[in-house]
Structures are given as structure tokens and as C-alpha cells.
Amino acid sequence: EVQLLESGGALVQPGGSLRLSCAASGFTFRSYAMSWVRQAPGKGLEWVSTISSNSDTTYYADSVKGRFTISRDNSKNTLYLQMNSLRAEDTAVYYCANIWAGALDHWGQGTLVTVSS
Amino acid sequence: EIVLTQSPGTLSLSPGERATLSCRASQSVSSSYLAWYQQKPGQAPRLLIYGASSRATGIPDRFSGSGSGTDFTLTISRLGPEDFAVYYCQQYGTSRLTFGGGTKVDIK
């Protein structure tokens, strides 16, 4: 069974940093590109970032470019999102998902990031 | 950036009725990279349709997708009680993903 388990969400002050993790199991993690998607409270889905299967390519939404860094450790089957210079508008549930056929095939349950003083 | 516009914003229907949801793109989208998701309150989204018309694993055949170019449709042939949820379309172009704003299907 495919499982994606996010962790690392917390309450953080504006300007602070946080690192999210996504532990994958049940599939060949190293074979798939992975993405982070977020959802602000009561709002729709927003793509955040994507990383290729071997980490050679990364992509970011304009809203997080220069502040967030996506990475992965294929030896640990884990995806990361380093978030710096956090803003109130980054408050959201953050989901990780694997990309297959251009779609987000499996999703984690999400982890809540709250940016507030 | 390709912008996806979903309509209507809310669709109020009764169980057993047919639901037709629209997703319009600001420029042509490869059909290979158009997907639909269902999201229920407090849950992660679930992939329903990929490649515009292929059902994901375990998705009932009452869900179908169609369309090409800039106009895509998700159809639920007969709404079951578990189908009342929010539905999102998504495209994957030049390795950047975008989502539509969602259509809420609620009980009339």
C-alpha cells in the first residue's frame, strides 16, 4: 500500500523557518517526481514545488521562489521542503504527492503550517 | 502560466442526478496532462481522472472525463451520497502545475 506521511508542520512566527518532511513507502520512491501542494484554510489547492526523480530539476511557484527549497533523499525515501522567510500567507495545510502521468497520484494526509505572531 | 477556470462554482443536485463540471484553460492543454480530483472535508484530494479521460485505480465508472484543447468536462453519471464534495481540475505543463478554483457539488 502506498503511504505518504508528512511531518514538521508547526506554529511559526513571520520571518521564521520550518522544514517539512514526507516519508514514502509502498512504492519505488526513487522512480517518481514528487510535489508539494498547499491549501490555505477554506481555500483551493495551490501547487508549491516539484522535484524530479533524481533531484536534477526543481520547479517552484512564483509565490515561494527564493524562499522555499525542495529536496529529497532517495536512500531514505523522504521528500523535504525547507521554508524560510515565512509569511502569514504561507499558512496552509501542506501535502506531498507523487507525480504519475502528469497527475498527482497519491497524496499524504497533510501537515499544518501556521505563520502568526 | 496556464489559468484553469472551473464552472459552476457550486452545483446543487439531488442523489441520482447527473453532474457536469467544466474546466476551461487560458491556453491549450495537452490532454495527456489534464487531471481531476475529488476532495471531501478534512481529507486529502483523491485522483479521479488523468490524461483527461482515464480513470484512476479504483474509481467507479460513473465518473468520466472528456475534452481537449481548452475545454474539459468531468461527468458523474448518477450522484451517489458519497460524491458530494469539491472537485478540482489540474494541468501539468512545462513541469509547472496549476489547479482550477474548484466546483462544490452539494445536496439540493
Image (spheres, coloured by chain):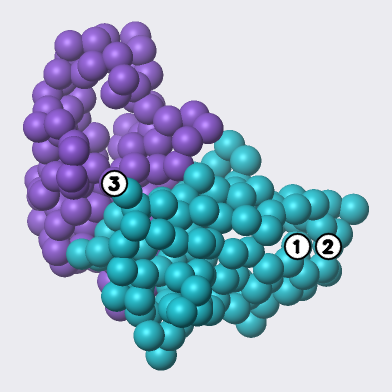
Chain containing mark 2: A
The image shows residue B74, relative to residue B15, as above or below, that is below
- Picture residue at 12% right of the left edge, 38% below the top: B64
Among the chains, which one is purple? B
Dividing the picture into quadrants, the one containing residue B46 is: top left
Is the residue under label 2 in contact with that under label 1 (CB below 8 Å)?
yes
Marks 1 and 2, how far apart at CA: 5 Å
What kind of element bears circle 3? strand
| Alpha-carbon span between mark 2 and mark 3 | 33 Å
Q: Is residue B6 left or right of residue A77?
A: left
Is residue A62 visible in the rendered structure shown here? no
Instruction: Give the left or right position of residue B52, taking residue A117 as reference.
Output: left
Q: What residue is pinned by disc 1?
A: A87
Answer with mark 1 or mark 2, whichever residue precedes in sequence: 2
Q: Which residue is mark 3?
A: B47
Query: Closer to the camera: disc 2 or disc 3?
Result: 3
**Which circle marks residue A99 in the picture?**
none
Q: Secondary structure at mark 2?
A: loop
| Residue visible at 69% across and 54% down in the picture | A9
The disc placed on residue A14 is 2
Disc 1 from disc 3: Cα separation? 30 Å
Q: Which chain is cyan?
A: A
The amino acid on which the numbered mark 3 sits, given as a three-letter code, is Leu
